[in-house]
Amino acid sequence: MEGSFQFQDPVTGRWETDAHLPFKMWTDSLPLCAKALRAKRKPQDLDLADIVEIKYCITRQNYRDAVVIAMKAIERNPHQGYWYYAISMAHDPVKGLKAAKQGLKCTQLTPFVKYQLMQRAVDHAGNLGIEILQQMPDVGDQKWYEGIAFLHSALEDAKTYISEAPPDNRNMKNVLYWYILLMVTINDLSPDLHELESARQKLAIADEIMQIVGSPPPLTHMRLTQATVLKYYKESIARFSSLSEKAGVECSDNFVNPTSEESEDKMATWLAKLDLEDEKLDSKEMYRVGEESKSGGLKLVSVDGDSLSLYRCGWCGNPSASLRKCSGCTKIRYCDVHCQKSAWSSHKKACKKE
């Protein structure tokens, strides 16, 4: 029986599940293990006790208690990555992302926790970036930069994950979906997407592994979305790059949000006003929506890296618009005092020069 203890009766030879223990499932033994570890009263055993207890909460999907235990444990030992892993499972994506990014900086980090934190950082940052950009902020304003910073953060962690994590890692497929979609959204790719060939091969391997273990990949929204993008990207670029370029340049002057009654007429009028002949854009223009890239693909945005850094923590890299400035140089920003103290040894020389 999965999850239960079994033993072979020495007399009958039969496998039994009643081992005369105070529990039947292995997960039910975790609180007792934690209690025994706490009784030793040693710092390392207290850490292990908290880890075991958090694991028990997670198996019961009691994430709230897991977060409470982790927050208290951080006060005793802020270098243990498992605490941040538990907090990253919180329903609040902002807190979850912050915990994931800080956890990746911990010195006490197992491979399992490292890749779990990295995957959660990708998920949280990607979803937050999409949520912000779906609000249609003006290109170049604060909210726009914040959304782009989230997507860049997700892409960076996705790159690291797929280059370091083993191919049979259970989150490999999901991170590859994110990587493919973010690369298409942010980067300057060629129409044939040859830059994604390695990622596509890894995705095929991950799918094959799932087939071997008898668990076909589920048809999630992420899987279907990336498959659709890969299938139609080249054709879409060929057909719509010129239209996208003109729409991005002129829609702010000519487009009026139509009412539900006038939508078709307004849209037809707006399209009629567009001059669809190719013309060069100002090379000094900072933001270009629908710009045709040098490789022939469609580059959706050009981003000023220095401006993006204003929305990234100088220590853990967490993207946010609510970071605190260093009071010394007023240029570097941090999530909180913990990140600022952690970064001080490397930042103090540059800070004192300002």
Image (cartoon, grey):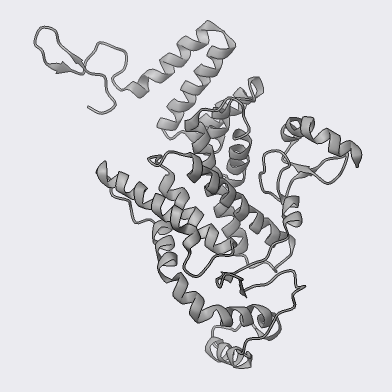
> Looking at the figure, which quarter contains the C terminus?
top right
200 vs 7, left or right, is: right
Q: Which residue is drawn at 46% across and 33% down?
A: 62
> Looking at the figure, which quarter contains the N terminus?
top left
9 vs 192, left or right, is: left
The front one of 96 and 250 is 250
Q: Residue at x 17, y 17 (%)?
A: 16
Whether residue 333 is visible: yes
298 vs 222, left or right, is: right
**77 to 282, vertically: above or below:** above
336 vs 104, left or right, is: right
Whether residue 91 is visible: no
Please identify the quarter of the rendering in which residue 92 is found: top right
Q: Which residue is drawn at 57% across and 82% down?
A: 243
**275 to 74, vertically: above or below:** below
Residue 50 image offset from top left, x and y in percent: 52, 21
Please identify the quarter of the rendering in which residue 95 is found: top right
Q: Which residue is drawn at 76% across and 51% down?
A: 310
**38 to 336, vertically: above or below:** above
Residue 38 image offset from top left, x and y in percent: 52, 11
Residue 295 image offset from top left, x and y in percent: 57, 69
The front one of 204 and 107 is 204
**283 to 46, vertically: above or below:** below
